[in-house]
Amino acid sequence: MHVLRSRWVGFLLAATWLIASPADASPRTYIKSICLSPEILEVDLLEVFTLPVGCELIDCCPGCPAADALDWRIRIGGKSVEAATLSFEGLADPAALKVEGAAEHTPDGATLMRGRSRLLNLTLPEQGRVPLAGLRLRLDPDFLGHAAGSGRRDETLDVVEVSIEQMLGSVAVNEFLLRYRLKSCGVLEPCDVVKQQGKQGADDSVVLLDGRDGADVCVNDEVRRGVTSTLVGNVKTKGSCTSSIVGVFSRDNAMAMLEDPPWTDTCGDEVAAALGPAWDMPVNLWLGKMIFVPDPGPIATQDLLAANALYDENKVGIAFVEKQRKQIPTDPGTLAKVALACQGLGGLESAGLYVKDQLNVYYGPVTVTGQSCDDRNMVLVGPAANNTTLAHELGHALSLHGGELEWGHSNDVPGMTPANIMWVGDSKIRTHFSLGQAFRFNVNKLSMLNKNGPRQGPERDCPPKPSETAPEPDFECPGLALDWSRP
Ligand SMILES: [Zn+2]
């Protein structure tokens, strides 16, 4: 993300992750920067990461024997942190977990105090899903009170470090270093306001801003929060700035996008963002027999529910609505048409297995886990899919698409983690769309939301992935990894 110096740096500024590429014998390092406000008491330090099984991870110990249990050596430092919680999922024998040092047992893991602690006997299943751990920081409220009343904007207030060494006996098989920088948000004086109208939920909406600030600086990708009303400092007329927008993202409403909002150069402006209902995207489900799955109907129902929940939690503002579901005939000719669906749809449309200008999802005898065709209204889901595959493929349909940019996959994009739904490969649980992705789903010309017609509104042409020809920052498009702090 690329914040120019401005008065807008928010009370709840989005978090930025940098993942240092793993080097030999050095820990995989995650760096997060966040501006501190009195409202933040808990922060997901790393939403989810995988415990290694043997040497599955890139920087896992080469040549080490396969493990059935690991011990973690943990060190937590930083004056703003009160404690951290670690929650495990998928351990073979959760009851076998023991804690030592500055730690306490909890039902699903441990609470870790500042200092050193050890978690012993993290048991790995012989097969199946890799266990996962979620790490959450609890900040010291006294430190927050102190920090909120002082500090220049962007001044570093504290650095929290969590180091985790995963030990197999006396050998470190994997190491993480999580470094968390707390910065001051600065104090924002009352001046201009964004007011949301027609808000359906009670969630803390995310307000995205570009424009000219009180100091005549063109600001880009500022993220602010507010249930219905958000202070934004002084925002002036666009002037010579490239972009002046207000975008509002919330759980149950469509994204509101205002271009060149009616700001004036003086304080006291109230810009109204009208929030309509979430955009409905019709989905046609075409259900064919799959290997081991004679009736994919229940799976399709679950996948659609899961996709809607994920898009909702990430405030995308798009709802996928089942229009119809139909069995795919089992004759070899039709099955072949489905298996080769991405090579051309002529056959499917005339066979009554395709609806133009709507999403068509095929569960069938395909070899892929999931695929989004060049005709982005077509998505294939295969028998090896998991419960986030459909949400992932729909992300491609909503403009994260294009072979030359690796399909908009979030791997290797600075600031992204394996929790991102567009991450492929070593991700077991994907829960997250970034704000940069949600913006593209809504606003990109190539998003089927715009091409199919449900949405009418300002459009942009933001690449599915930063590249040499389309580097970030870019005033037209928020950074792909631009994000907001959950919840
Ligand atoms: Zn993909």
Image (spheres, helix red, strand yellow):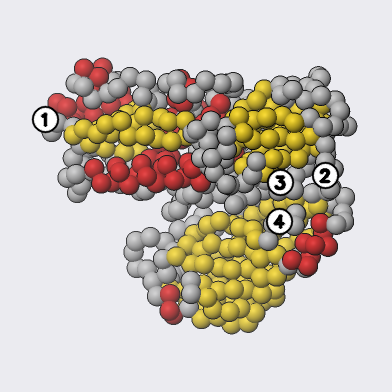
The picture quadrant where one finds residue 271 is top right
For label 4, the SS is: loop
**Nearest the camera: 314 or 474?**
314
**Nearest the camera: 158 or 38?**
38
Q: Which mark is residue 13?
A: 3
Residue matched to label 2: 188
Cα–Cα span, label 3 and label 1: 55 Å
- Answer with mark 4 or mark 1, whichever residue precedes in sequence: 4
For discs 3 and 1, the disc positioned in front in the rendered view = 3
- Answer with mark 2 or mark 1, whichever residue precedes in sequence: 2
Compared across the picture, whether 159 is left or right of 418 comes to right
Q: Amino acid at mark 2?
A: Leu
Q: In x, y percent, where is residue 265?
A: 85, 25
For discs 4 and 1, the disc positioned in front in the rendered view = 4
Q: In x, y percent, where is residue 403?
A: 46, 28
Residue matched to label 4: 39
Q: Can residue 127 be seen here?
A: yes
For discs 3 and 4, the disc positioned in front in the rendered view = 4
**Residue at horizontal 78%, vertical 67%?**
142
- Answer with mark 3 or mark 1, whichever residue precedes in sequence: 3
Residue matched to label 1: 331
Compared across the picture, whether 418 is left or right of 91 comes to right
Q: In x, y percent, where is residue 226?
A: 67, 44
